[in-house]
Image: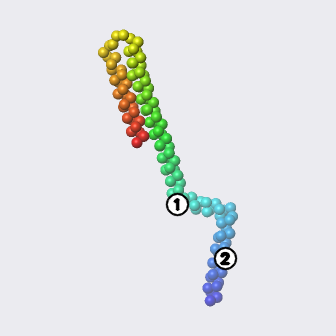
Amino acid sequence: MDVIVFVYAVGIIIVGGIYLWTFTKSGKNCLANLYSASPMGTYTKQIEQRQERKERDKTRREKLAGFFYDLAKLCFGGLVVGYVISYSSVTGLIEYDMLKPLFGIASTIIFSKIANDILK
């Protein structure tokens, strides 16, 4: 019975010493390093990094799609609307001038399709 009491008392002293050591500066540093080295610590960091990467990719895709939509608007405005205005001011119609609005409409559709595919 005395041996059990002695083992119990020594265990309490050791555990109490470790507990008190955790409040010291070196104990806090050791626990901080232990937390960052644990699998759960790195797991939460990996999740945060993955979420940040997803947000960056989403923003990048949105900006790229916006660029292609703007490009489609420029093609439409420059080729189709520009042709209509120039056609109304010029009385003669030349055959190859019909390629400008067709190219403008085709490029507008293509760039809009690319932008839509990027956003999907």
Q: Quadrant of residue 80?
A: top left
Question: Which of the labelled discs sits on residue 13, or is there none?
Answer: 2
Q: Residue furthest front?
A: 88
Q: Locate the N terminus by quadrant.
A: bottom right
Question: Which of the labelled discs sits on residue 116, or is there none?
Answer: none
Q: Position of residue 115 (x, y in %)?
A: 41, 36
Residue 78, relative to residue 46: is it above or below? above
Q: Tag 1: Cα neighbours inside 10 Å, few (<14), some, or many (≥20)?
A: few
Q: Amino acid at mark 2?
A: Ile
Residue at 52% x, 52% y is 48
Which residue position is annotated with label 1?
A: 40
User: How did the renderer colour the structure?
Assistant: rainbow
| Secondary element type, mark 2 | helix
Residue at 51% x, 60% y is 39
Instruction: Specify which label sits upstream in the sequence, 2 or 1.
Output: 2
Nearest the camera: 53 or 17? 53
* Distance between the alpha carbons at the discs numbered 2 and 1: 30 Å
Residue 88, relative to residue 21: is it above or below? above
Q: Position of residue 33 (x, y in %)?
A: 59, 59
Q: Amino acid at mark 1?
A: Met
Q: Position of residue 50 (x, y in %)?
A: 49, 50
Mark whose residue sits in front, 2 or 1 = 1
Q: Position of residue 51 (x, y in %)?
A: 50, 49
Q: Residue furthest top?
A: 91
Q: How many numbered marks does the figure carry?
A: 2
Residue at 57% x, 58% y is 36
Residue at 69% x, 64% y is 24
Nearest the camera: 77 or 107? 77
| Secondary element type, mark 1 | helix
